[in-house]
Image (cartoon, rainbow, N blue to C red):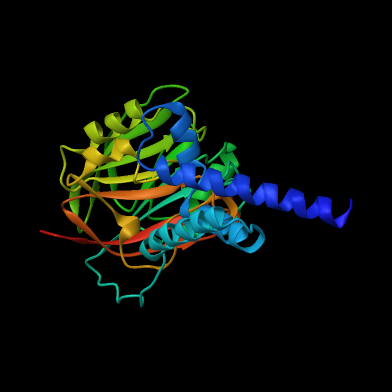
Amino acid sequence: MKCGTWKAWVRALAIAGLLLAWLGIICRGRDSWVVPAVIYYATPWLLRLLAGVLAVVVVKHWGLRLMAVTCIFVSLLEGWHSFRLDPPPAVPASSLQAAIYNSGRSLESTTEVWPVLAETDVTAIVEAGEFTPVKWQDFSTATAGMEWQRFGGTMLGVRGKILSHESLGVEDLYRCYRCRVSLPQHGEFTVVVVDIHSQPWLPREKSMASILAAAKEDPKVIVLGDFNTPPETKWCRDWHPTLTLANNGSRRGFRETWAYGAPLLTLDQIWLGIGWKAAWTEHLRHGSDHARVRAVLDSTN
């Protein structure tokens, strides 16, 4: 391929990426129908930032360059909100630790992860995969002190008792399990475990409304989920102030988790009722395409 042809293709790619990035900005929070939803979910701020930088480098037209600089500025503002380098706090014994982890259906074979899952008081696992009876016994031994409840490929473990559970999801759209748990130092409260299907063209309105309905009655609720949806979605506006996003708490790194760290769909989130405040949130990688999100929570009572 000739040098001029190669440069023309790069310029065309940069212009297309810039236009897509601008569509992502315009569609932000306007995901009430499928086309803007797909564009918005597929263009997180980091991807838009990279598109703007590429356009500034290779595109010469002043109007497109102005669009690129504006795109970079807007994306950097979002990045400023996302990226933090807070110092890790001391964790008092009275804190509760909660985590969400999508194991990519490989939990049975990643035995080195099992003891890590028992380090938190409440752990939700989605896409856990299947266990043979022998492997399940080994897993239970490695996570001694945790009581587990399995819902097909979804699991909830607590360092206490699971008092009750019910399924509220809709097949082919989302899975939602509302559980009542009891922990020795923290009493009874509700945990909602969520797994929303990843396809961005599937509607989110019903799933997000149902999750809020499942969570809103308990001020000490903890919602642990693979949402595959940005928290700024239109459908989360009704969640405030009933629920707050623990991912926004003190942290070192990005607020979002992405598949293999590539900035596409925003994945895993922890939402809290008004009875909790996130003192610290961190992302930990254990071989899955998802990071495990762990939050240290303090009671507000």
Q: Quadrant of residue 61?
A: bottom right
Query: Residue 271: x percent and y percent?
Result: 29, 48
Query: Residue 155: x percent and y percent?
Result: 43, 40
Residue sitting at x 77%, y 55%? 7
Residue 177 relative to residue 118: left or right: left
Residue 113 position (above or below residue 180): below
Residue 222 position (above or below residue 94): above
Q: Quadrant of residue 97?
A: bottom left
Q: Is residue 143 visible?
A: no
Which residue is nearer to you in this view: 68 or 185?
A: 68
Residue 142 position (above or below residue 231): below
Residue sitting at x 54%, y 43%? 20
Q: Quadrant of the C terminus?
A: bottom left
Query: Residue 245: x percent and y percent?
Result: 29, 52
Which residue is nearer to you in this view: 159 or 294?
A: 294
Q: Residue furthest front?
A: 62
Residue 286 relative to residue 79: left or right: right
Which residue is nearer to you in this view: 186 or 3?
A: 3
Q: Residue furthest left?
A: 301
Label tally: 0
Q: Quadrant of residue 108?
A: top right
Q: Residue furthest right?
A: 1
Residue sitting at x 35%, y 46%? 231
Query: Residue 33: x percent and y percent?
Result: 40, 27
Q: Is residue 192 visible?
A: yes
Residue 210 relative to residue 104: left or right: left
Which residue is nearer to you in this view: 225 or 109?
A: 225
Q: Residue furthest top?
A: 171
